[in-house]
Image (cartoon, grey):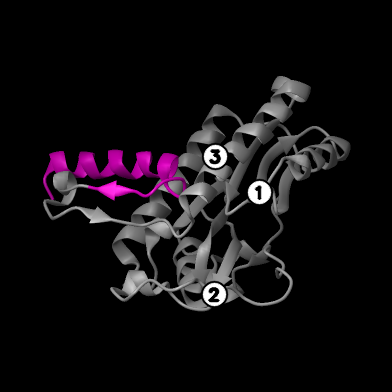
Amino acid sequence: MSEWKGRAMMLALVALPLVQGCVPLVVTGAVGGTAGVVAQDRRSVGTQLDDRGIESQVSDAIDKKYGSDVNVDPSSYNRIVLLTGQVPDEATRTDIEGMAHRVANVRQVVNEIRVAPANTFSSKAENSYLVAKINGRFLAENNNLFSPLQIRIIADHGVVYLMGMVTQSEGDAAAKLASTTTGTRRVVKVFEYLGSVPANEQGQTPAPVQTQAGPTPPVQAPAPVDEALPSATQPVSP
């Protein structure tokens, strides 16, 4: 690969976390010299807009009450809100979870906020770099086992959170790649599982997406031990 192409690929990977999981992503032939690749988001356009609004409303509510006293990032996918970051005490952690629950259209809240000092600039850069590395592996090593553009990746303190609407096998394959990426300490799956890959993605007539029947199962299932780095089974310290 030429130096120019290498730099272009790195820029693409760094930019990818900013848009992945929010809107359909179009990758042109500028990097790979191939025809454009188009990924269709499995969420409806209305749901994508709801997710953007939910993230904005939760973030605004937190900023209005706590300002710079906390460092919390809300991520919404199919109206499930993941909270990551740091707060000074357990009461604040619980209060922010309540804020997220009260925002319109929120179906579920996964509270992964840590009681710990706020991330430094260096820590934030490490989080972004880890997301970029995992994105790179998802694009290059997915072996057609899952669509990397259907999965949103969030990283905090070496813990990688995966969000998306996927089949069980897709989620397991993605978790395995993420958990064996250098810098990952643990993988948490915040997935909604589909019964099968949507027919329209297989070149067939679009069919309604079937999800698992019954109550929504717990979404904080860590990756199997044999899919993780040796340290991935250890508790994450503040």
Closer to the camera in the image, 186 or 31: 31
Residue contact at pointers 1 and 3, CB within 8 angstroms: no
Q: How many marks?
A: 3
Q: Helix or strand or loop: what does disc 2 sit on?
A: loop
Residue 107 shows up from this direction = yes
The boundaries of the magenta stretch are: 1-27
Residue contact at pointers 2 and 1, CB within 8 angstroms: no
Which residue is labeled 3 in the image? Answer: 52
Q: What main secondary structure does the magenta stretch of the protein show?
A: helix
Which residue is labeled 2 in the image? Answer: 210
**Please, what is the three-letter code of the amino acid marked with disc 2?**
Gln
Q: CA distance from mark 3 to mark 2?
A: 24 Å
Q: Earlier in the sequence, mark 1 or mark 3?
A: 3
- Looking at the image, residue 23 lies above or below residue 69: below
Q: Who's the residue at 42% across and 56% down the image?
A: 41
Q: Helix or strand or loop: what does disc 1 sit on?
A: strand
**Please, what is the three-letter code of the amino acid marked with disc 1?**
Val
**Please, what is the three-letter code of the amino acid marked with disc 3?**
Arg
Which residue is labeled 1 in the image? Answer: 81
**Residue 12 counted in the magenta span:** yes
Please tell me in which quadrant of the rendered image residue 64 appears.
top right
Please tell me in which quadrant of the rendered image residue 212 appears.
bottom right
Disc 1 or disc 3, which is closer to the eye?
A: 3
Q: Who's the residue at 15% across and 48% down the image?
A: 29
Of the 4 image quadrants, the one containing the C terminus is top right
> On the rendered structure, is 215 left or right of 192?
right
Please tell me in which quadrant of the rendered image residue 108 appears.
bottom right
**Residue 212 counted in the magenta span:** no
Q: CA distance from mark 2 to mark 1?
A: 21 Å
The percent position of residue 136, horizontal first and vertical second, equals: 34, 54
The percent position of residue 21, horizontal first and vertical second, equals: 46, 50
